Image: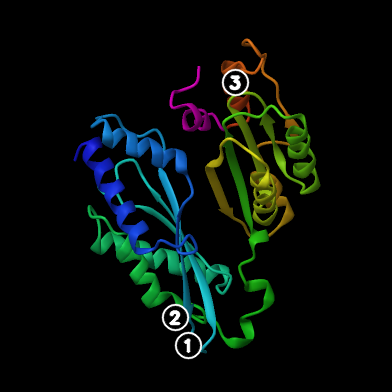
Amino acid sequence: MSNLEEAEVQLSELDLLSSMFPNEDEFKVTDQLALAELKDLVERCSLEAPSSKIQFIMKLELETPGGNKAEFSLSCAFPIKYPAVLPEITIRSSSLSRSQQMKLNTDLLAYLKKNCTGEVCILNAREWVKDHATAYINKDLSSSSVGKSDVKRTEDIFTRLWIYSHHIYNKQKRKNTIDWAKELSLSGFSMPGKPGIICVEGPQTMCEEFWSRIRRLSWQRILIRHREDISLEGTEDEMEEQRKFSCFEEKIFDAHGARGNHMDLGQLYRFLVDNKCADIFQMYFGVEGQ
């Protein structure tokens, strides 16, 4: 299957999902830039491969055997070669312990490998979760062992958000960005100018609070370009080990241009290399850094 055929299949499946689940509480594409690129490739009948993966979230509310409600989210991504390769799907629920969540994800992957390799399969995955997920809530655990410490907490998830903005000029926005990141104990950096880049990393709840605040400001365009979620054992040391940046700071890379609003992208790339995240450069700009 060619790159164009794969892109057409991915776009067709996304269209189907959006028509079946028009409510954002059920289905939401989280990377609009990647979606726009995919549509452009299909419209131009281009044989190029997309520069980034389509990412989206599906949510379900299911009734447990005890009659309660439990929410499950499926964080999904289409690898560039999907459906020739399986999609990336991670199921999360606050109703599951860490071990239950791992078992559920392992079993879903086994099901997809056995039944869906080489085929579009998001609806199949959703139906499997709908039919099986609640059975994992008490699986392999006695009632006495289901303690508060076993429940999956968002504090046990380390998150890194790579945010793209059409531009960042406003001094107050720049100050808010720095102040809020420090208030929430997030590390990372912001690069003002055109385009504008913000990276924040730390506990998932704090990253989501930062994003909630920043997106409420007036922007020409702002979105999460890439997101990383890493499950931890819950220790503070482990959280700190995941950080790529020691603090949060604003970075200026030899501003130039008529308005002094364009940064030296070569210096940005070297900064990303130094902090072991060089692959992000291509996600933002569609070319490899130099």
Q: Where 252 falls versus 213 (above or below)?
A: above
Under circle 3, the secondary element is: helix
Q: Residue 65 carries which label?
A: 1
Q: In this view, does 103 lie above or below 28?
A: below
CA–CA distance in space, label 3 to label 2 = 48 Å
The type of residue carrying mark 1 is: Pro
Query: Where does the magenta region start and end?
Result: 277-290
Q: Please indicate, yes or no, whether residue 31 appears anywhere in the rendered image.
A: yes
How many discs mark residues in the rendered view?
3
Residue 91 covered by magenta stretch? no
Is 118 situated left or right of 201 in this image?
Answer: left
* Secondary structure at numbered mark 1: loop
Labels 3 and 2: the sequence-earlier one: 2
Q: Do the residues labelled 2 and 1 touch (CB within 8 Å)?
A: yes
Q: Which residue is drawn at 56% across and 67% down?
A: 98
- Residue 19: x, y in percent? 34, 59
> Which amino acid type corresponds to the residue marked 3 in the rendered image?
Arg
Please rate how many residues cluster around mark 3, counting C-alpha atoms within 10 Å: few if below 14, some from 14 to 19, many from 20: some
Which residue is identified by label 2?
135
Q: Whole-Å distance between the Cαs marked 2 and 1?
A: 8 Å
Q: Residue at left 60%, top 43%?
A: 161
* Residue located at (30% from left, 57% from top): 16
Query: Which of marks 3 and 1 precedes in the sequence?
Result: 1
Q: Is residue 138 left or right of residue 254?
A: left
Which of the 4 image quadrants contains residue 241?
A: top right
* Position of residue 60 measured from the top left corner of the image (x, y, whole percent): 46, 70
CA distance separating discs 1 and 3: 54 Å
Residue 137 in percent (x, y) is at 51, 79
* Residue at 61% over, 32% down: 197
- Write down the residue under mark 3: 270
